Image (cartoon, rainbow, N blue to C red):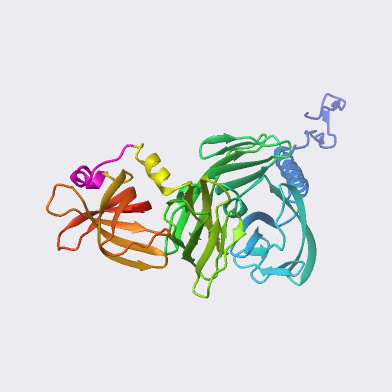
Amino acid sequence: MPGIAPTHSAPGGAPVPTEAPVAAPQLTSPRRRPLWPWLLVGTLGLLGVLMGVGYWLLRPSTPVSAQLVSSPDGEALALSCLECPDGSRVERGAASAVFTAHQATLPLSEQLGVGDHELTISLSRGGRTETLKLPIGVDYRAHIDLGALKDRDPPALALVVEARPGSTVEVQGQPLSLDTNGRGVWREDLSLQLTGPSSRVERLERDVEYQITPPGGAPQRGSAKLRIGIATLGVDAPLPRLTTAKPSFMLSGVADPRADVTVTGQPIKRGDAGRFAQAMAISSPGETTIRVKATLADHAPRFIPLTIHRMDSLAAAAESFRKQPTKRLAEVRAALGESRGVKVAWTGRVSDASSAHGRQVLLLDVAGCGAASCLTRVVYAGEATPQVGDRITVFGEVQGGVPGPRTGQLVPEVYAEFLLSE
């Protein structure tokens, strides 16, 4: 505000000079600084503190993550560690592994069962060593049981499943029930694949698909693979069916020299080359089926079934055989490719004969066939020993067609159950 002072007049009205007026100081408000920079700095600081606390609260309990995997020598832990430089070393017991590109594979000396596990490992990195605990969960295990293939009768492919109780399981698209402990076994009969003679090791290959859903978890799919050879086995005598009036017969054949051969569970002695010959007793009249079995380590077994029919006499056997449907030679020759398994009872004269390992091969000229050539190949492995020129009747089954003595000739082949000589 401007200064105001009274004026004084000298006598006569002249103004009396006074001191020069002094202006009163002006009062102004102080200048205020903005607050937002301080608020920003404070907010960022608080966020930094919160993030730091969150990191320590939420950080992984261990810098190493682990997953259970299969390895050529069993099972292993596939380890991942982003904080582990190359050369970092991890140990568990006698097993160890070195990290490369943040990855390492640590072998396990044992197989972990179904359930939750905590494995202790030692991690050395950057000049320091620390002990870590790794949580490992195993939801299920599934494996093929070779014992069911080798020891079960009939032989079976068995998949054993162990899962957390309450899991649901499907094998080959079909549900599999588990017991209260979470265990179940799926089986498939393999009798057909393992039955019949073979002089070479054949392969048995099977893939078994499964799906396992743990309680509250997602479905997990897998496949169990079976890749195994089948033991070799051949039986020369008797043929698949034998009818006899005697209380015994001779069993002969060949198997891998390393294999064990049994008949109805009883061992059969073999020579160095794997050949065997054993007299077998028939306790009483009647029909029975026995199985010759060859077992070899790391192989599936092979079976050959033999049906043995003991009769009071071969004449009675012939009478019984003729009651079955049979066909004449002309009928068989007209449809040779479709005649396997056809029963025949043909009479003729032996025009050629040979034998080896208890099995005889005859060339029979069948009587009354109504054709220029009536030859039939007969395979026989019984007690009779027909000679060239003998007249016999063959009772057996057609196996198919084989080359005859003349070029381009095809003749029936018959496996004889028994013979009658005239």
Residue 347: horizontal and vertical position, in percent? 27, 50
The residue depicted at 49 percent of the width and 61 percent of the height is 250
For the residue pair 407 and 32, the one nearer the viewer reads as 407
The residue depicted at 73 percent of the width and 70 percent of the height is 126
Residue 334 belongs to the span the image colors magenta: yes
Residue 69: horizontal and vertical position, in percent? 62, 56
Residue 38: horizontal and vertical position, in percent? 74, 42
Residue 136, compared with residue 35, is above or below; it is: below
Magenta span covers which residues? 325-338
For the residue pair 388 and 31, the one nearer the viewer reads as 388
Residue 164, compared with residue 249, is above or below; it is: above
Residue 86, image quadrant: bottom right
For the residue pair 214 and 123, the one nearer the viewer reads as 214
Q: Main secondary structure of the magenta part?
A: helix
What is the residue that sits farthest to the bottom in this orientation? 272
Q: Is residue 367 left or right of residue 122?
A: left
Q: Is residue 337 left or right of residue 13?
A: left
